[in-house]
Image: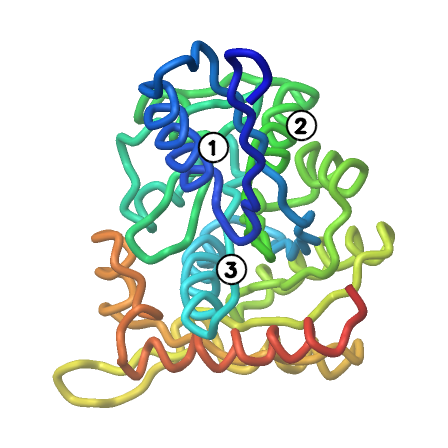
Amino acid sequence: MVNDRAVVVVDASGLGAGERSDVERAITDILGEEEGVSEVRVAMMADKVHRRIIAVGSGKGGVGKSTLTTNLAVALQRMGMKVGVVDADVYGPSQPKLLATEGQKPRAENDKLIPIESKYGVPVLSMGHLVKPAQALAWRGPMAGNALSQLVDADWGDTELLLIDLPPGTGDVQLSMLQKHKPDGAVLVSTPQDLALIDAARAGQLFEQGKVPIIGLVENMAGYQCPHCGETSDPFGSGGFEKVADSIDLPFLGRIPLTLDIRKAGDSGEPVAASDSEQGDAFRAIAAKIADWLAQEPA
């Protein structure tokens, strides 16, 4: 006590932004009722979390990059990592639907956004949380880059790893990220078809020029098994991205099949990685390789 002011220092290590606010509010309410106390000040002290960033990119749209990001985040979280998702696709945000946080608005404290907690324990921020549904954004490059900075520089609390769901291509948002928030590594995703592979190679060159290590390549929509006859077909080709990985000496992280279950799970905001299913196993196997890479690379 200093005169009529109560000053409390709290060890907030391991608490997220929302939990810190709850603790501060509870202390203020309790001490504020004490006789002789007219002001309460709470100082939150915590060890600074070293946060790592992995970018998930593709050369073109429609290859399942956002679905991969969501499921990797959930899989890594189930493995014990504290993972958050930044939806950097400011023109076509998908993460609010994929993580079932549509309609929710983040609040701000001390000029920083507070991420929205999904029901899977993965906090997320997206332009889809800040603008009206289906609202078109006619932003030039600098505005999109500034929006990305607000999402990345939010109060992520004790989050250890941020997965950044990048927009497709090699535009202003990607360049802004490399300049301001250089990732620790990148994961590239493509379908097996030749046109997608050419675009994915361009995305890879961008990361290499920015001296961002490429963790590996993921082939998505790789094979479709007919639910009626069981026959497997390859509408987008087969094995193309694995051949690319071999030719440029990059790790091939795995394949994700083209299945109705994955599509339905994404539309309903219930990632298959949160379930003990065969489709979830495919994402978990890739997540395990990423976790191994993080363990081997110096922070």
Report how far apart the C-alphas of labels 1 and 2 lie in the structure. 19 Å
Report how far apart the C-alphas of labels 1 and 3 lie in the structure. 16 Å
Q: Position of residue 147 (x, y in %)?
A: 59, 25
Residue at 43%, 10% in the rendered image = 38
Residue 45's place in the image compared with 240, above or below, is above
The amino acid type found where label 1 is placed reads: Ile
Residue at 42%, 57% in the rendered image = 70
Residue at 41%, 37% in the rendered image = 23
Contact (Cβ within 8 Å) of mark 1 with mark 2: no
Q: Residues within 10 Å of mark 1 (few under 14, many from 20)?
A: many
What numbered label is drawn on residue 6? none
Report how far apart the C-alphas of labels 3 and 2 lie in the structure. 25 Å
Q: Position of residue 194 (x, y in %)?
A: 59, 67
Which tag, 1 or 2, sits closer to the chain's start?
1
What numbered label is drawn on residue 82? 3
Q: Quadrant of residue 7?
A: top right
The amino acid type found where label 2 is placed reads: Gly
Q: Position of residue 191 (x, y in %)?
A: 51, 66
Residue 56's place in the image compared with 115, above or below, is below
Q: Is residue 200 left or right of residue 26?
A: right
Which tag, 3 or 2, sits closer to the chain's start?
3
What numbered label is drawn on residue 114? 1
Q: Residues within 10 Å of mark 2 (few under 14, many from 20)?
A: many
Q: Which residue is mark 2?
A: 145
- In the rendered image, the residue lying farthest to the left is 228
Contact (Cβ within 8 Å) of mark 3 with mark 2: no
Q: Is residue 15 left or right of residue 195?
A: left
The amino acid type found where label 3 is placed reads: Lys
Which tag, 1 or 3, sits closer to the chain's start?
3
